Structure formats: structure tokens, C-alpha cells
Amino acid sequence: MPGQAGREYGPGVTDDDGSTDDGYFGENIAADYDDDTADMSRPDAVDPAVDLLAGLAGDGAALEFGVGTGRIALPLAGRGVPVHGIDLSRAMVKRLRAKPGGAAVGVTIGDFATTRVTGEFALAYLVFNTINNLTTQDAQVDCFRNAAAHLRPGGCFVVEVGVPELRRLPPGQGAVPFHISDTHWAFDTYDPATQAMSSHYVTIVDGRAQHSSIPFRYVWPAELDLMARLAGLRLRDRWESWTREPFTGESRKHVSVWEKPAG
């Protein structure tokens, strides 16, 4: 599938279609996103990821799919790596732009599964389960093809994503809680027949419950490897985390690196 080309609409930012749709990450999410993910922004969480990505980028540029508020893009650019990002949400990108160094990261507004930007990259990457935001297998396959199309020969595509936790589901159960407090409940629901999942959030405000949910599609490591092969990429490394612990049958997430053949 041919990608969508971006068009200029402001300094350092392009827009693929002029749409105002921020998807599931509009102002209501973007306003509190950095506070809600503060634990992931600590140096001990960010530095190992940036170390690995900077090493893979080398003397080349990096392209982030789902750049968001710049948790990884900004420190990576601070290491001297030219970084461009693709994101559907203007509200998230607005937060990136307001941060120190935000103007140095080019951004294209669009669907990272198909949106193309100019230039050739040594590295494409997406982090924190962002591949699951693509809710069909076709879209996930397109994402790998899009990454491969942007990479120079020898370049790498990196994905950080959780391993589906279906082993925690006893027969007849379709939900797995991941946060419970007096005022906030959060749980994931799974449909093993379609690989559809949703994250649900219930918050108690003034004695009343407010519910929101975001749909995802979970994906297995072997399935990702096949998507990579369809895009002409080959698996180079897979670890349990950014600090490169071995990936095992007990690992709850993985960081995988696929390479575009140099030939």
C-alpha cells in the first residue's frame, strides 16, 4: 500500500490530510499524560532505551512512530541524533513542542502505519505498546512495511511491546485488572478469537463513576517476526527489556530489533 505524503503547515510540522481527529489521544488524555506516565519518565526508565536507540542510529537519523509528548524523542535528540516523529494527536504534539528542545524534533501529523516522510533513516522505532494502537492485523503489517520503506540498507526497526497475558485468564474469564485503588480501577479485556483487547479505566469523582476505554490489538512475538519478514526485515535481537536481559518464556514484554538487509 503506498504511503501518505505529508504537507507543510507550520515550522517543523507536517500534516498528512488536514484532519482535526486526534484519535483516542485528544486533549482529555494529553492534558494529564505526562503526569500519568511519570514513572516511565524517570532516568532509570528512559536512559537505557535512549542508550540502545542512539547506538543503533549511529551517525544516521531516527524516526519515531507515535512520538507523543516526546518522552524518548527529546532525550534521543539531545544525544545528537536527528529525530523526526509521526503522531495522529496534535494535542500530544503540542506538549512536545512546549518542552525544552521540542522545536528540534520534526513532526508529521498522521497515521504512522501509512504516513511517509521525506528522508532516509538509520532507525525507526516505537515504544510502550504503541504497535497495539493499530487495531487490525493489516494495519500492523502496514506499519512494518512503512518502517522498512523509511530505512536505509542496514537500518533497524525497534518495537517495545508486552507479551499478551492470556496465561492469567482462567477458563471463562476475559478481564485482567492492573490497578485497583479506592478511587481508580483499571483492567484489560481480551478476546482470544480476534486478538482484540481494550484497556478500561473507572474513576470515582464526587461519588460517581466515570468510565473510559481504549481499543488495542495484542500481537505475539512470532507474529511480529512474520510481519517483519513480509516487509523484508529480519530479526536481529530480542531482549526482555532495554537493559538487554535475555527474553524467556516468563518475560512479560520484549524489545525486538529487526534489520533491513544491507544488500
Image (cartoon, helix red, strand yellow):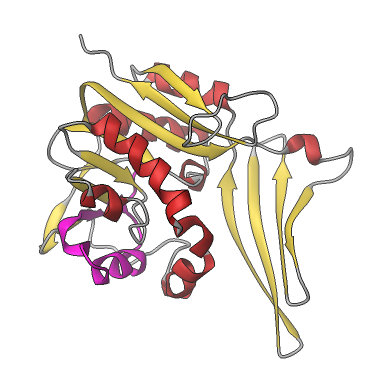
Q: Residue furthest front?
A: 44
Picture coordinates of residue 124 (x, y %)?
Answer: 30, 36
Picture coordinates of residue 13 (x, y %)?
Answer: 17, 59
Above/below status of 175 relative to 233: below
Q: Does the image show residue 131?
A: yes
Quadrant assignment for the N terminus: top left
Picture coordinates of residue 69 (x, y %)?
Answer: 35, 62
| Magenta span includes 55 | no
Extent of the magenta region: 86-113
Q: Nearer the viewer, residue 32 or 24?
A: 32
Above/below status of 27 relative to 38: below
Q: Residue at x 10, y 64 (%)?
A: 11
Q: Residue furthest top?
A: 263
The quadrant holding residue 209 is: bottom right
The quadrant holding residue 27 is: bottom left
Q: Residue at x 13, y 54 (%)?
A: 7
Above/below status of 62 relative to 73: above
Quadrant assignment for the C terminus: top left
| Magenta span includes 90 | yes
The quadrant holding residue 252 is: top right
Picture coordinates of residue 196 (x, y %)?
Answer: 63, 43
